[in-house]
């Protein structure tokens, strides 16, 4: 699997209702894309739940690289670029991504980006992330959990989608 995310920083006075409407009106257009496992249309509103800025940051888990390729070269991503400019797209090799059938009920996301230091035993880190995943399922409200690593800048990216706000508030804001 491949984790993919892009983040679009928005001005402080940006009417975030535009993003909410965009998700409602266009989010279904990616339903059934070949190779797409999970999608989460994340956004943050400055001052809410600890967010310091307005942003739109969709997150995807692709089962196959061809799906990612076709999405980025297709009309949906072209429309996003026409509206906001072409964002930098972050991708990472997913160690795992698991979600429950009720994932559409998620209302909160925690996204963490952590450094992977030189000399880190990657196999041991993968096992640690599997243990981290198990701990997330023990939390009330968790609906999706993913962990991936980006070897271009040696970072670990973790995602939790939940019915409940993160504790502490603002932790891992998009």
Image (spheres, rainbow, N blue to C red):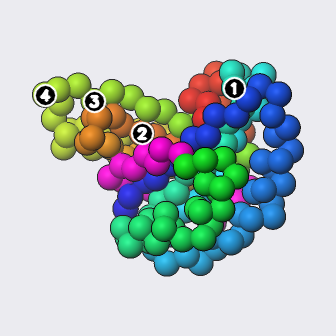
Mark 1, residue position: 53
* Few, some or many residues within 10 Å of mark 4 (<14, 14–19, 20+): few
**Viewer-side residue, 2 vs 110:** 2
The structure residue drawn at horizontal position 27% and vertical position 30%, both measured from the top left corner, is 116
Residue 45 shows in the view: yes
**Viewer-side residue, 167 vs 157:** 157
| Quadrant of the rendered image containing residue 104 | bottom right
Looking at the image, is 94 positioned above or below residue 32?
Answer: above
Residue 142 shows in the view: no
Which sits earlier in the primary sequence, circle 3 or circle 1?
1
Secondary structure type for disc 1: loop
The numbered mark at residue 157 is 2
Label 4 or label 1, whichever lies nearer to me, is 1
| Structural distance between the alpha carbons of marks 4 and 1 | 34 Å
The structure residue drawn at horizontal position 42% and vertical position 67%, both measured from the top left corner, is 69
Mark 3, residue position: 116
CB-based contact (under 8 Å), mark 2 and mark 3? no
| Structural distance between the alpha carbons of marks 2 and 3 | 10 Å
Please provide the residue range marked out in magenta: 87-105
The numbered mark at residue 119 is 4
82 lies left or right of 47: left
| Structural distance between the alpha carbons of marks 4 and 2 | 18 Å
Secondary structure type for disc 2: strand
CB-based contact (under 8 Å), mark 3 and mark 1? no
| Quadrant of the rendered image containing residue 47 | top right
Which sits earlier in the primary sequence, circle 4 or circle 1?
1
In the rendered structure, does residue 101 fall within the stretch colored magenta?
yes
Secondary structure type for disc 3: loop
Secondary structure type for disc 4: loop
Quarter of the picture containing the N terminus is bottom left
**Viewer-side residue, 12 vs 145:** 12
């Amino acid at each position: 699997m491949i984790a993919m995310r892009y983040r679009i920083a928005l001005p402080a006075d940006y009417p975030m209702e535009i993003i909410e409407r965009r998700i409602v009106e266009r989010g279904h257009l990616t339903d059934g894309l070949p190779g797409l496992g999970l999608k989460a249309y994340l956004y943050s509103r400055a001052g809410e739940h600890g967010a310091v800025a307005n942003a739109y940051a969709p997150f995807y888990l692709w089962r196959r690289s061809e799906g990612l390729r076709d999405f980025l070269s297709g009309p949906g991503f072209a429309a996003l670029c026409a509206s906001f400019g072409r964002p930098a797209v972050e991708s990472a090799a997913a160690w795992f991504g698991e979600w429950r059938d009720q994932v559409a009920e998620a209302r909160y996301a925690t996204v963490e980006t952590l450094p992977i230091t030189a000399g880190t035993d990657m196999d041991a880190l993968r096992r640690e992330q599997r243990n981290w995943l198990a701990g997330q399922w023990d939390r009330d409200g968790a609906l999706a959990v993913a962990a991936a690593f980006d070897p271009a800048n040696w970072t670990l990216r973790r995602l939790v989608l939940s019915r409940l706000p993160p504790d502490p508030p603002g932790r891992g804001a998009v």
